[in-house]
Amino acid sequence: MSGERERLAKASRIVVKVGTSTITYKNGQLNLNRLEKLVRELSDLKNSGHQVILVTSGAVGAGMARLGYSERPKDVAEKQALAAVGQGILLRIYERLFDEYGQTVAQVLLTKENSVHHNLYANSRRTLGRLLELGVVPIINENDAVSADELKIGDNDNLSAMVATLVEADLLIILSDIDGLYTANPSSDPTATLIHRVEEITPDIERIAGGAGSSLGTGGMMTKIDAAKIAMSAGVAMVIAKGEVDGVLHSVVEGEEIGTLFAPKEARLKLRKRWIAFGRRLDGAITVDDGCAEALRVHGKSLLAAGVKSVEGSFKTGATVRIIDLLGREIARGIVRYDSETIGAIAGLSSSEIAERIPDSDGQPVVHRDDMVIIA
Ligand code: ADP
């Protein structure tokens, strides 16, 4: 057993995400047996001293079952209606099952808004923190019934990573219909083997996760890799494991080598930096030259106009943007001190040239190092 795995036992705050494919049968009906086991394991984790948060899919599935659908509808309004019917059913089941083990649950429905606006971010953080202090198990889902597309987080893998970041969890466990990340999609490549540990999300990892998921699940592996990026950068360990394995949560927390572990980056980002990196809407992108990329990444410098090659998108001062190198790789995210038009106009100029053109610029960089988070 590696020391890294052993440390998982010390995780005091654990977010567990279950996918649709884990808690529903192929025909869309809820798998009550699986739900019961899951709740038992979560209650046990809690009894042994961990704080737990559950992020659960399955509302649409529960709605489908109740209204006699055999296939997931394509129409968005219809899906949202099914989610509205199913969310209540799902929560009632969880509430009853958790009650059997003496646990109190709370339903928290989030949208992207909760991570984009700083006051809502702080507010959701406080509420979740208070629920945990009260010994309650928060059960979280995206507010599917009313979320408009642009407000959507889109999938519960990303939602669970956002929640883990929000509550500063130590561990995020994603339960799926597969026991981890394989070297290729095992449903199409029988020679694929399980990867036990991922240190960094390389283009190779992104490529092997590219295949589509099951018909019921929505994200496949790709969204789990996106979630891993968020979790790892925020210093949260993440494990993907198979939901149907008996005692799976216990095994992960005991440090057994099951599933795929995505190792957390050692240094935790400060809260504000985390908010910059993952909590805000991205309004555009700035491409920088190689020298500038190195200055940011290696030397922790501010982004100066001299290194800017091009600007994408139309945004105001104070927007959050991606910072991209010449190969198109995202290297950082940050808050801009000029609007997109001005950045376009001063791209490539030295500080003295900028001072001439924009007398009130005060020698401001395009993105100050304090407002920037290095991603890769
Ligand atoms: P969930 O509903 O649990 O979120 P999904 O069905 O959406 O799960 O995603 C898991 C599926 O992703 C696997 O069953 C598998 O078919 C697919 N997949 C694609 N590429 C890979 C890979 N490299 N390793 C493992 N699974 C993969």
Image (cartoon, helix red, strand yellow):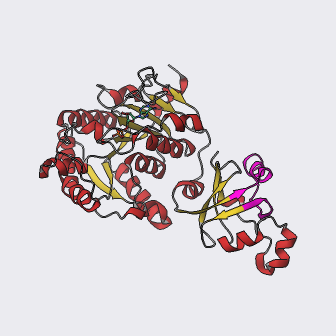
Which quadrant would the C terminus be assigned to in this image? top right
Across and down, in percent, residue 40 comes to: 24, 34
Residues shaded magenta: 287-309
Q: Of all residues shown, which one is farthest toward the bottom?
A: 359
The residue under the point 39% across, 30% down is 241
> What x and y, as percent, mark residue 304?
77, 62
On screen, residue 341 above or below 247: below
Residue 92 visible here: no
User: Residue at 61% of width from left, 61% of height from top?
Assistant: 321
Answer above or below: position of 71 versus 4.
below
Q: Is residue 190 above or below residue 32?
A: above
Q: In screen coordinates, is 354 left or right of 30?
A: right
Whether residue 259 is visible here, answered yes or no, is yes
Q: Nearer the viewer, residue 371 or 106?
A: 371
Query: Residue placed at 44% from the left, 44% from the top?
Result: 223
On the rendered structure, is 320 left or right of 52? right
Which one is in front, 46 or 77?
Answer: 77
Q: Position of residue 164 (x, y in %)?
A: 45, 47
Q: Is residue 296 a member of the stretch shown in magenta?
A: yes
Residue 359 place in picture, x, y as percent: 81, 80
Query: Where is ligand 1, by quadrant?
Result: top left
Pick the front one: 193 or 355: 193
Residue reaching furthest to the front = 188
- Asked whether 188 falls inside the magenta stretch, the response is no
Q: How many marks?
A: 0
Q: Is residue 305 left or right of residue 227?
A: right
